Image (cartoon, coloured by chain):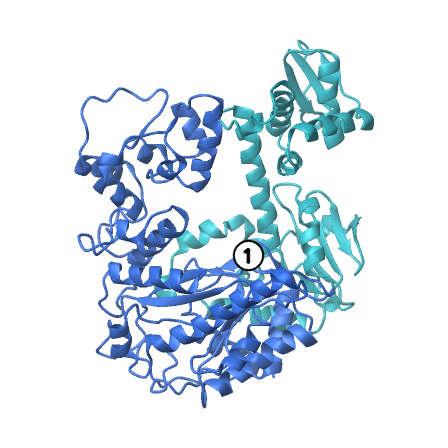
Chain colours: A blue, B cyan
Amino acid sequence: MFERIREKLEILADAAKYDVSCSSSGSNRKNHNKGLGDAEGTGICHTYTEDGRCVSLLKILLTNHCIYDCAFCVSRRSNDIKRAAFTVDEVVELTMNFYRRNYIEGLFLSSGIFKDGDYTMERLLRIVKKLRVEEKFNGYIHLKTIPGASPELLKEAGLYADRMSINLEMPTELGLKLLAPEKSHEDVKRPLGLIQDSIVQYKDEKALIKSTPKFVPAGQSTQMVIGATPESDKEIMHTADRFYKKFSLKRVYYSGYIPISNDNRLPIIGSQPPLIRENRLYQTDWLMRFYGFDVKEILNDANPNLDVDIDPKLSWALRNLDQFPVDINSADYRMILRVPGIGVTSALKIVQARKFGRLHKDQLKKIGISFNRAKHFIRYADSPIQLNDFEAGHIKGLILSESNSKYLKTPSNQLSLF
Amino acid sequence: MELFVFDGTFEGLLTSIFDSYERKSQHVKLVSDAHYLPDVFQESIKIVSDETKANRVWKGLKQKLDPEWMKRIYKSFLSEQPETFQDLFDFSHYIFDNPKGSEENFGNPCVLAISQMDRKVHREKHRMEAFIRFQQTADGTFYAHIDPDFNVLPLISDHFRKRYADQKWIIFDLKRKYGLFYDLDKVEEITFDFTTEMSASLNALPQQILDPKEELYSLLWKDYFRSTNIPARKNMKLHIRHVPKRYWKYLSEKQI
């Protein structure tokens, strides 16, 4: 008995781990019925795997049986692997018992597609409904939208889930057609749009009628696999930008492709996943969402790919030296935020603190900016007089020689394994 | 310079601020009696905690600071750090002696010190919310113990009460020898005395008092933790940055 459930969990957790979304934040579900759990406020990472990824949710597939044959996926039907499926009760019990012990924030439930979309979605719906209605579970639930499932099922699922997501898989239609001819981006856009419309509709109603139920309160997200197909960073980020705007997505995840197949359309097994590139894409994503950058400023026809040796904010600054130096004591917040080495928290502190007097070097250091990086781009109360203008290559060299970034010591374009 | 010795309580700290104004003290060094080393060349003034004085100082601060900052004061007090007691003393004087809004002056050392200590305590609180692992005992109570860097039990009480409203639980601080007990209705402070023979490591409760299913779920959790790792992405440096080794003792998935 023990052994069977252990084996199932092993197979179905292993198959689910390539979906990188781990967030458990953004919902507003309170423990209103003296039940179990509370998904209000910020998320919590309960532990981290040895690859440094956070574990916040019990992330499992309902089953890894699948009718599709997508080349990049471990669960593709032509792959010769062990298959398993949970029962509804097994998923419910695992979730409740893990949650009670403070192991997790909630459930991330996905599934291979068996029979058809509706049949699969209907099972997922039964699980979340049972958790919410019978078990009074108020923890976080991230539910996968199954492509091809009927609008009625999706709309009902949205009443129980905190977040829903459906993956683009490849950044462009062309890439997707190459590896998964049975799928298309249209199959993703339709349900994204449907759920987005319902979110807006429920929100409007909520403004008038307080008892309107919650509908996907933590919004939607999607994921793209990076490095399986030859898209440029520009294509990836412009796709992300379009989806952020069109569907008000909360997150786009970028997942460096981990070779799991001998298919000759894909990188061979054993080649390193593109971890640095993935990191640079996330940095760009942050610049777009929190730093007021337009994607076209960072990636355009002149610069279709991100630098590997420096982060995208620094490389933007070096390309636009005419906008620097920025005077910390007079520049507006928007521009201070664009200085390499100054983050959102420090920028806010700076604009508050300078009301009390001009800021000096030691104060800036204490506030927590990365001074060695920022000093090339700013003026402050006691900044030294600088006669000659530095040019971009010189500054880059200075910063690289002083920095001890995890990437620079190993100039190869991959991380060392040890 | 005058040396104030207070009893280490929050009330005592606020009282010392009151007394410093009453005595028109210029420069004050504040220490708690736990950290006080008598010095022949320096006379010390013993502060007697006084609820009325403390309340007046608290009310005075409230008139100048928003609730967020009031929380910051309390949270940094819970750090129990000797230098933070001094920072809190200096900060309060700075707030009283300057116009409203002065707390935004991050160029001032004690403003920055308080806001940074608040972050540290907050981080420790957040870690406890994340890393506590309950074990279910045979009578259905969920038990966990901790020995956090700072005194965070008062800060995590609400979080666990809201979240685990339908189960009894105990969280015990081994270092400070007190705990919280939720009886399905309210949270109470408890003390008990078995802690001397209790090891700080996890899984401290003997098998016979645990729920029969406890072993299964902790085993499944370890399995899950292993299966969800992607070996091709192994990055121990990052792993340790997120889960510093001193917290491993809490984590059942890190025990062999």
In the image shown, does A343 or B208 lie closer to the viewer? A343
* Side of A297 where A66 appears, left or right: right
Pointer 1 chain? A
Using a 10 Å C-alpha cutoff, classify the residue at mark 1 as few (fewer than 14 neighbours), some (14 to 19) or many (20 or more): some
Position of the C terminus of chain B, as image quadrant, is bottom right
Name the residue rendered at 64%, 33% in the picture.
Answer: B73
Residue, far top: B41
The residue depicted at 67 percent of the width and 36 percent of the height is B74
Q: Which residue is mark 1?
A: A43
User: Quadrant location of residue A376?
Assistant: top left
The residue at the point 47 percent across, 71 percent down is B227
Q: Residue furthest bottom?
A: A115
The residue type indicated by label 1 comes to Gly
Left or right of residue A415: residue B71: right
Helix, strand or loop under label 1: loop
Q: Is residue A418 visible?
A: no
Could you tell me how many numbered marks the image carries? 1
The x and y percentages for residue A262 are 26, 79
Locate residue A254, reporting x and y percent. Answer: 36, 62
* Residue A82 point in image, percent of width and height: 43, 85
Q: Residue at x 34, y 74 (%)?
A: A185
User: Does B42 appear above or below A69?
Assistant: above
Can you see residue B254? Answer: yes
Considering only vertical position in the picture, is A133 above or below B98? below
